[in-house]
Image (cartoon, grey):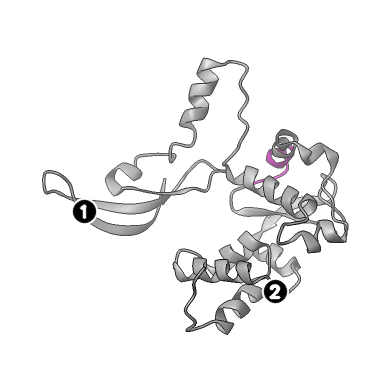
Amino acid sequence: MKLIRKTGTRLNKNGTKIRYGEFLCSIFDCGKIVERQISNGLKQKSCGCNISEIKKQKSNPNYKHGGKGTRLYNVWALIKQRCLNSKSFNYKDYGGRGITICDEWLEFIPFRDWSLSNGYAANLEIDRKNNNLGYNPENCHFVTGKENSNNRRPQKVKNKEIVLKILNLWNTKNYKRKELANLYNVSISTISNIINKNKGRKINE
């Protein structure tokens, strides 16, 4: 796993100081961040996300990895949310204006297989070549976060609950503006406007 930041030292039962840090899982489509002893974390490849899958495969030869909880699964789930769920924060900019997801991708496995065969990587994001058309193999490809942000339309976030969530996540100091933009599928400038407009404000859920 990759060490992201050191979180300090703690004393174990024997009074020995143990260094801890936050690590990014090395499984390419996981993206989970976990805290580990630095000496152990540097030796590990994954956060443990693949252990249950290995056990299932050993106990059931017909078992096929569903992918739930992985980064790629979350990408797919968000696409379905904004295209199909009228209560989704982004629905008005997607399903609400006719952006659809093709029948083939209503199931995760076909989407996963297409992604892995068409350049998916943990540092890339899915993008529609024509922003007026839906999510399907012909209209989608993977691009960098910067390229994707440039393609997004600046917009105002009018939902107060979403604004509060963005501000609370920003105040934890664990998220960059780019990460929040990706999480809520808005431009970085939109995130910056929310942060700058609310500087010094006490935030409560």
The image quadrant where one finds the N terminus is top left
Please tell me which residue lies in front, 178 or 195: 195
Does residue 147 lie above or below 140 as drawn? below
Q: Nearer the viewer, mark 1 or mark 2?
A: 2
Question: Mark 1 or mark 2: which comes first in sequence?
Answer: 1
Numbered marks: total:
2
Does residue 28 lie above or below 184 as drawn? above
Residue 109: which quarter of the image? top right
Task: Tell me, yes or no, if residue 129 can be seen here.
Answer: no
Residue lying at the far left in this picture: please name it. Answer: 14
Q: Determine whether the residue tagged by mark 2 lies in a helix, strand or loop.
A: loop
Amino acid at dot 2: Lys
Point out residue 121 in the picture as x, y percentages from the top left corner: 62, 47
**Image point 72% across, 69% down: which residue?**
150
Residue lying at the far front in this picture: please name it. Answer: 205
Relative to 79, is 204 on the left or the right? left
For label 2, the residue is 158
Point out residue 142 in the picture as x, y percentages from the top left corner: 71, 52
- 85 part of magenta stretch: no
Instruction: Tell me which segment is drawn in magenta.
Output: 114-120
Relative to 168, is 111 on the left or the right? right
Q: Determine whether the residue tagged by mark 1 lies in a helix, strand or loop.
A: strand
Relative to 8, is 177 on the left or the right? right
Does residue 57 lie above or below 82 as drawn? above
Please tell me which residue lies in front, 153 or 121: 153
Point out residue 56 in the picture as x, y percentages from the top left corner: 53, 22
